[in-house]
Amino acid sequence: GENVEQHPSTLSVQEGDSAVIKCTYSDSASNYFPWYKQELGKGPQLIIDIRSNVGEKKDQRIAVTLNKTAKHFSLHITETQPEDSAVYFCAAVPYNDYKLSFGAGTTVTVRA
Amino acid sequence: GAVVSQHPSWVICKSGTSVKIECRSLDFQATTMFWYRQFPKQSLMLMATSNEGSKATYEQGVEKDKFLINHASLTLSTLTVTSAHPEDSSFYICSARRQTGYTFGSGTRLTVV
């Protein structure tokens, strides 16, 4: 099955700086890569996703890049704000399966 | 759009009793829903895949007789934790699959005393 590794496990950044989280996946058949933000006591919320036919996608301060050859994808948050503090999870879905395989999560703390 | 409603948000029950958690897709039909369990500071662990009109598929190590899943309609899946024990205390989250992705419920904090 798919195995997703996520780094770093914790990330502390100064408000206004950028945050980058990286994930690698093992199954070359994976074709959908969502990123979720989870606040304490709540369910994960999709913040951005990318499919394997696209190399980069951007939505305001958030961007995701995908390198299919290297089997890794990254989340970039620019101009971080205190409300960006949360746990972020990457995930991957193989084209022949419906199950999300999650990374271990990254706890992001934005210092004011 | 694409809202998944999960209830209750928290529940406290006594050991030996059963608890039902509901997951509803409010504005779309979900033929496939998923149930996860999450321990503090850990990732989501898939427990089972719920398919409308058929039996759920459980992940290895998950007791199907303890965690009963019913997906009787295209908008409702339920998870019943039977004969709950303190070790079942956890955060349970459902998710519904759509054509464009996955939407998660808000989670249920189960505490067994």
Image (spheres, coloured by chain):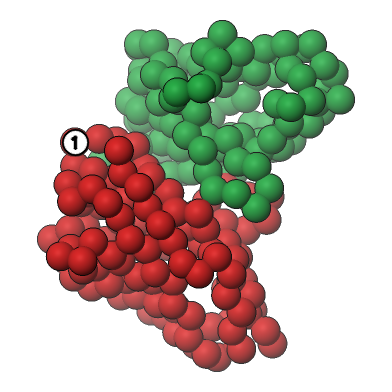
Which of the 4 quarters of the picture holds residue B71? top left
Asked if one can make out residue A8 in the rendered structure from this viewpoint, the answer is: yes
Q: Look at 79% across and 11% down and name the residue there.
A: B16
Given the image, on which type of amino acid does mark 1 rest? Answer: Asn
Chain A on-screen colour: red
Q: On the rendered structure, is B80 left or right of A48?
A: right
Where residue A40 appears, as percent x and y from the top left, is 68, 56
Q: Secondary structure at mark 1?
A: loop
Crowding around mark 1 (Cα neighbors within 10 Å: few <14, some 14 to 19, many 20+) is few
Chain B on-screen colour: green
Q: On the rendered structure, is B113 left or right of B85?
A: right
Which of the 4 quarters of the picture holds residue A106? bottom right
Where residue A111 appears, as percent x and y from the top left, is 67, 84
Q: Look at 39% across and 19% down and name the residue there.
A: B57
The residue that disc 1 covers is: A96
Q: Look at 72% across and 11% down and name the residue there.
A: B83
